[in-house]
Every structure is written in structure tokens, then in C-alpha cells.
Image (tube, rainbow, N blue to C red):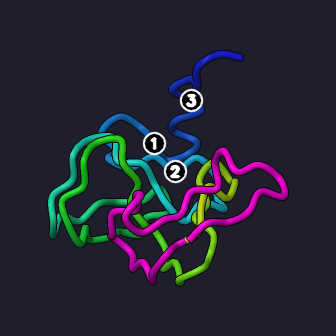
Amino acid sequence: MGFPSSEDSEKNGNAAGQALLVLDDRDNVATLLRPGRRGEELALASGDTLRLVEDIPSGHKVAIRPIGKGEFVVKYGTAIGRATCDIEVGTHVHVHNVQSLRGKAKGASRGQ
């Protein structure tokens, strides 16, 4: 398994200069490839744009669709967590508004 080629990146809308990386059409978050500033408008591969609600560090996630409280946060086409509050488009998606599903054992009790 190798790294994605530039052809793969362009097919997925992540050509050089793109600020957002979306890995799967089912994703409701994108990864910022550089720091993003509040109020900045960023383009998605679909041609749509989103405006950042707050400053977001490089490598962190941003909502590209509204995510309701309790809904899954989807990255890589896989649920990675549940929203602990409503998350609007352009909002930083991180530990302050997502309960991670990673490392949860089957049948493990769910703490509060």
C-alpha cells in the first residue's frame, strides 16, 4: 500500500493549493491542510464553499455539513465519534464537541 498519487489527489479534489482534504463522499468533516482563519472561505472539491466559524489549526477537522447532536462524525467513510452538541458547517470538530468511538471495546460500559 503506497501513498496516494497526485492523480488520486486531483480525482478527490485535493490538488495542490487545496486547504481541505475530504477522503470519502460519506465524510461530514474535512481535514485542514494548513491553519484556517475565522471568516475565511474555503473551497470543497464539489465546488461548494464554506466559511470558517473560528480559527482551526492545521491537521484538525472542520464540519462540511451540519452535524446534529448525537449524530455520527464521519471521516474516511467511517464513524469516528458522536457529536456532543449541534455542529454547524465551518466549525472546528474536535474533543470539545465529539465523543470518540476509537478504542471502545464491544460491550464496554459507556461512562458519562
Q: CA distance from mark 1 to mark 3?
A: 10 Å
Q: Residues within 10 Å of mark 2 (few under 14, many from 20)?
A: many
Q: Are marks 1 and 2 in contact (CB under 8 Å)?
A: yes
State whether the magenta stretch is mostly helix, strand or loop. Answer: loop
Quarter of the picture holding the N terminus: top right
The three-letter amino acid code for the residue at tag 2 is: Val
At 42% across and 77% down in the image, what residue appears?
Answer: 87
Residue type of the residue flagged with mark 3: Glu
Which is more toward the observer, 109 or 10?
109
**Mark 1 vs mark 2: in front:** 2
Which residue does the image show at 58% across and 20% down from the upper left? 3
Location of residue 33 in the rendering, given as x and y in whole percent from the top left corner: 33, 41
Q: Is residue 79 left or right of residue 59?
A: right
Residue 14: image tag: 1
The amino acid sitting under disc 1 is Asn
Classify residue 34 by image quadrant.
top left
Q: Nearer the viewer, mark 2 or mark 3?
A: 2
What kind of element bears circle 3? helix
Residue 45 coordinates in the image, percent (x, y): 47, 56
User: Foreground: 86 or 29?
Assistant: 86
Per the image, the residue denoted by label 3 is: 7
Q: Horizontal placement of 6 versus 19: left or right?
A: right
- Residue with the mark numbered 2: 22
Point 21% across, 53% down: residue: 36
Q: State the separation of the CA atoms marked 1 and 2.
A: 8 Å
| SS at circle 2 | loop
Nearer-N-terminus badge (2/3): 3
Q: Nearer the viewer, residue 111 or 82?
A: 111
Residues rendered magenta in the picture? 83-112
